[in-house]
């Protein structure tokens, strides 16, 4: 090996995104850097970086299963929720099968469908950003997989539990439902669905979650899914050997130990979201009824994205003119409000 080249290291470290950046509002990341307790646990994991992680992430699975109150064999682990969704598609689909999703949806879904060589069938949202669950159930009759995000990305909307129940009753038993709960921790308790109870009644439902959003660990890439044991066994056959980095287990354990500090951060983010929506409303700007760490402004006759061009703010614009803005600090909110105000003048 050659002598270490510090310039290259410096360049690589310099290329890392800044943990705190009030202008970075395009990826629905958590605005807070890892908690000190999580960080110090992670340093210990890095100190064992010469060792492989577990062959299959069984201890991590036990940890997450215990936290959820399900059996170990109901849980699968992924490289982010992304990894879990790909694992589901690898396990249950064949090229040419259909996958039903909304439009717009989380950007990953069309990519995942493409990767698994599936035919994407899209169903539009209504003008307030809600799913048309009846149309999705109709489309799912001939599909292998159907995806419902709750809260939805990009609109942040939440379909009522009773509507989800009616929808699930209409889905054929051999169609797999991905219930994407990437943002579930931001939901008020009365909006939450009892996931373990739901998968006990619907053996074709996989609930997918992540440590990227409320837990603030997007860079570490840990997600999980849980479902009925029979389906989980099928998914576990696609569990990649040594696939979860050695940091995964300690990151999750330390996060569970820091639950109350994380909940405090979640409260700060949801309070900031309410404040941002209130400021937008006061300027006459409609945003959808958002329940996660972002707000969505539907199209308004011109591209919302243009409003933020040149302001330094990074937001996620959509082809139809809508925009999704991640909730950050009060500084982020001020920057968003002043960009919108300038556009309205
Ligand atoms: C609805 C939804 N599902 C899944 C993901 C993927 O998250 P992860 O970072 O865990 O792969 C995202 C990320 O933005 C998302 O918005």
Image (cartoon, grey):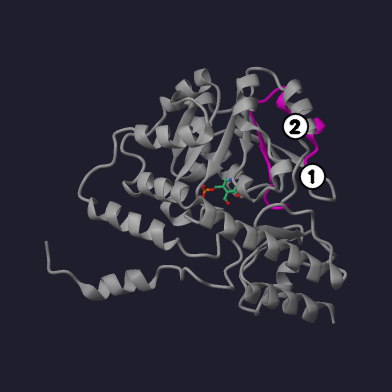
Indicate left or right for 124 with 222 as reference: right
Q: Residue at x 69, y 18 (%)?
A: 172
Residue 100 position, x and y percent, is 68, 34
Towards the viewer: 102 or 296: 296
Question: Can residue 21 be seen?
Answer: yes
Reply above or below: 195 against 33. above
Q: Secondary structure at mark 2?
A: helix
Range of the magenta residues? Answer: 131-155
Q: Residue at x 56, y 53 (%)?
A: 214
Q: Residues within 10 Å of mark 2 (few under 14, many from 20)?
A: some
- Find the distance from the CA under tag 2 to the CA under tag 1: 12 Å
Contact (CB < 8 A) between labels 2 and 1?
no
Q: Which mark is residue 130?
A: 1
Residue 137 position, x and y percent, is 76, 28
Residue wearing tag 2: 164
Reply above or below: 113 against 45. above
Residue 124 position, x and y percent, is 78, 43
| Residue 120 painted magenta | no
């Amino acid at each position: 090996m050659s002598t270490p080249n510090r310039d290259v290291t410096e360049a690589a470290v310099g290329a890392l995104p800044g943990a705190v950046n009030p202008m970075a509002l395009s990826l629905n990341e958590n605005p807070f850097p890892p908690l000190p307790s999580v960080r110090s646990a992670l340093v210990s994991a890095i100190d064992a970086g010469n060792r492989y992680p577990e062959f299959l992430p069984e201890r991590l699975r036990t940890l997450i299963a215990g936290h959820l109150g399900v059996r170990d064999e109901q849980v699968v682990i992924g490289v982010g929720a992304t990894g879990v969704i790909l694992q589901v598609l690898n396990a249950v689909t064949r090229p040419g099968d259909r996958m039903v999703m909304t439009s717009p949806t989380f950007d990953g879904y069309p990519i995942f469908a493409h990767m698994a060589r599936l035919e994407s069938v899209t169903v539009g949202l209504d003008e307030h950003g809600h799913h048309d669950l009846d149309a999705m159930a109709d489309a799912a009759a001939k599909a292998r997989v159907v995806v419902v995000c709750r809260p939805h990305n990009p609109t942040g909307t939440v379909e009522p539990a009773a509507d989800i129940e009616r929808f699930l009753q209409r889905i054929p038993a051999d169609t797999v439902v991905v219930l994407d709960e990437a943002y579930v921790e931001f939901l008020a308790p009365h909006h939450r669905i009892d996931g373990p109870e739901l998968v006990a009644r619907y053996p074709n439902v996989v609930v997918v979650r992540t440590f990227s959003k409320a837990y603030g660990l997007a860079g570490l890439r840990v997600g999980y899914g849980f479902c009925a044991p029979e389906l989980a066994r099928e998914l576990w056959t696609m569990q990649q050997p040594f696939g979860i980095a050695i940091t995964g287990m300690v990151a999750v354990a330390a996060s569970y130990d820091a639950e109350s500090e994380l909940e405090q951060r979640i409260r700060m983010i949801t309070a900031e979201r309410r404040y941002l929506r209130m400021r937008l409303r006061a300027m006459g700007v409609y945003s959808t009824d958002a329940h996660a760490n972002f707000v969505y402004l539907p199209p308004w006759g011109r591209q919302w994205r243009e409003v933020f061009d040149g302001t330094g703010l990074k937001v996620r614009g959509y082809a139809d003119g809508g925009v999704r803005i991640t909730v950050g600090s009060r500084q982020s909110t001020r920057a968003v409000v002043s960009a919108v105000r300038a556009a309205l003048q």
